[in-house]
Image (cartoon, rainbow, N blue to C red):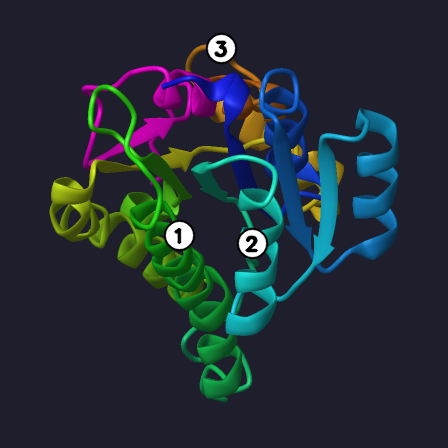
Amino acid sequence: MAWESASAVVTGGASGLGAATVRRLAQYMTRVVAIDLDEERGMALAKELGSNVVFHKADVTDEVAVAEAIELAAAAAPLRASVCCAGVGWAAKTVGRDGSPHKLDLFSKIISINLIGTFNVARLAAAKMCSQDADDANQRGVLVHTASVAAFDGQKGQVGYAASKAAIAGMTLPLARDLARNGIRVVTIAPGVFDTPMMQTVPEAIRESLAKSVPNPSRLGFPEEYAEFVQSILDTPYLNAQTIRLDGALRMV
């Protein structure tokens, strides 16, 4: 795939894993559209990186806004990559200390942003890729999604988050099978504990404990490592329908 004559969309593109991915892809793609709700950070990133990076404010569950972002990317070059990093990690136990049940609207919101948002972007990006000519290897593009080790090792208080991430992992194979005849690959990354803005809201003592729990290397992951892995996925044509842990051998108990 000739990435230098291609475009990409990256959700959650204003910070953390998404911003690192935007930075990486901007080095060789014609256009990268960073999709996020944080307009201040998104505009600053686009200004910093240059004319081939465009910020588009959008909620990933908004069909119209996401479609606009995809068209913005494809207007510059064929859309060949969609990377979904947008997500939330709000925590709550099934039954609280006071005996109150987990709020249903909170669970629904987590599922909506993390899972439905990912699928919304996937279906719209795939449709745009299908409308474009394939390359010489009959390939049209790659969808990269972000699950979490919580999909497999969910902790207490993570029922909504773990469910949403497990579902992202679960739809990887059927998505890849659906899109195989169109020359579109689907790969999901399941990150461990990464040094992102979400992690920076965690108390320092807990952050240090999490870092020490990672076998090797014994530290938090760098967003740049996630972005590097995205590039590896794009550059490996035979990699498809996989959910791959990127976690330094971490297993949560």
Q: Magenta residues, as a range?
A: 229-253
Choose between 189 and 84: the one closer to the eye: 84
* Residue 87 appears anywhere in the view: yes
Secondary structure under tag 2 reads: helix
Q: CA distance from mark 1 to mark 2?
A: 8 Å
In this rendering, position of residue 20 left or right of residue 214: right
What residue did someone put label 3 on? 217
Q: Position of residue 181 (x, y in %)?
A: 12, 42
User: Which is in the foreground here, disc 3 or disc 2?
Assistant: 2
In this rendering, position of residue 22 left or right of residue 204: left
| Residue at 23% across, 47% down | 172
What residue did someone put label 2 on? 71
Q: Position of residue 7 (x, y in %)?
A: 54, 34
| Residue at 65% across, 28% down | 20
Q: CA distance from mark 3 to mark 2?
A: 40 Å
* Residue 148 appears anywhere in the view: no
Residue 20 within the magenta-colored segment of the rendering: no
Q: CA distance from mark 3 to mark 1?
A: 39 Å
- The mark found on residue 128 in the picture is 1
| Type of the residue with mark 1 | Lys
| Residue at 34% across, 35% down | 141
In this rendering, position of residue 98 left or right of residue 125: right
Secondary structure under tag 3 reads: loop
| Residue at 46% across, 72% down | 112
Q: Please determine whether, in this image, residue 148 is positioned above or below residue 154.
A: above
Circles 1 and 2, Cβ within 8 Å, touching? The answer is yes
* The C terminus, quarter of image: top left
Circles 3 and 2, Cβ within 8 Å, touching? The answer is no
| Type of the residue with mark 2 | Glu
